[in-house]
Amino acid sequence: MEKSNQQLINETDAEIDQRRIQKLITHIFQSEELPAETILNIVFTDNATIHELNKKFLDRDRPTDVLSFNVHAEYLPSELQILGDVYISVEKAKEQADSFGVTFQDEVERLVVHGILHLIGYEHEDTKQQRKMEGLTEQYLAFSEGGK
């Protein structure tokens, strides 16, 4: 297996198909024209940890499904290409998978895509931005579903 600069860190006992997620990340990077050597961390964690991060950094006193933290590249050497970190609550992903009637893996992948799109610069502050982000999410998830 080739070396990757995209780390998947599972702090839980949830079974996650990391190979599928790695393929999805590679596809997103290629489609968004990000260099393959771009550094990205995806951390699968629990509600308590994501709640703490949400409160500390966004002043929101509750757990959430996904948080994205950009790295401020202007402070880094130019040869380093770091996108940032995405934290995903496995507990929230399981709840949402049940609620949406999808598999846990599919919901995790939706959250991975959502988190990466935020790091790249996509937002959903208004209807136009939300439609664009939802369209890209569906496009990337269709790729993932085709590659099962």
Image (cartoon, grey):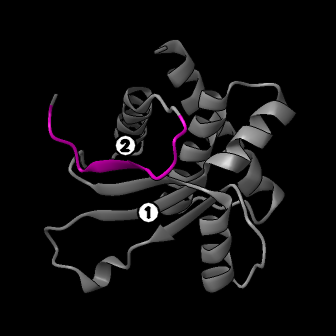
Crowd rating for badge 1 (residues with CA inside 10 Å; few <14, some 14–19, many 20+): many
Residue 132, can we see it?
no
Q: In the rendered view of the protein, which quadrant contains the N terminus?
A: top left
Q: Which residues are magenta?
A: 2-14
Residue 98 rendering spot, x and y as whole percentages: 81, 32
The image quadrant of residue 24 is top left
Q: Is residue 144 above or below residue 11?
A: above
Which residue is rendered at x = 21% and y = 43% of the image? 4
Residue 82, can we see it?
yes
Residue found at the very far right of the displayed protein: 99
Q: Is residue 52 magenta?
A: no
Mark 2 = which residue?
Answer: 29
Label 1's element? strand
Task: Say left or right for 1 vs 89.
Answer: left
Which one is in front in this view, the residue at disc 2 or the one at disc 1? 1
Q: Earlier in the sequence, mark 2 or mark 1?
A: 2
Residue 26, which numbered label? none
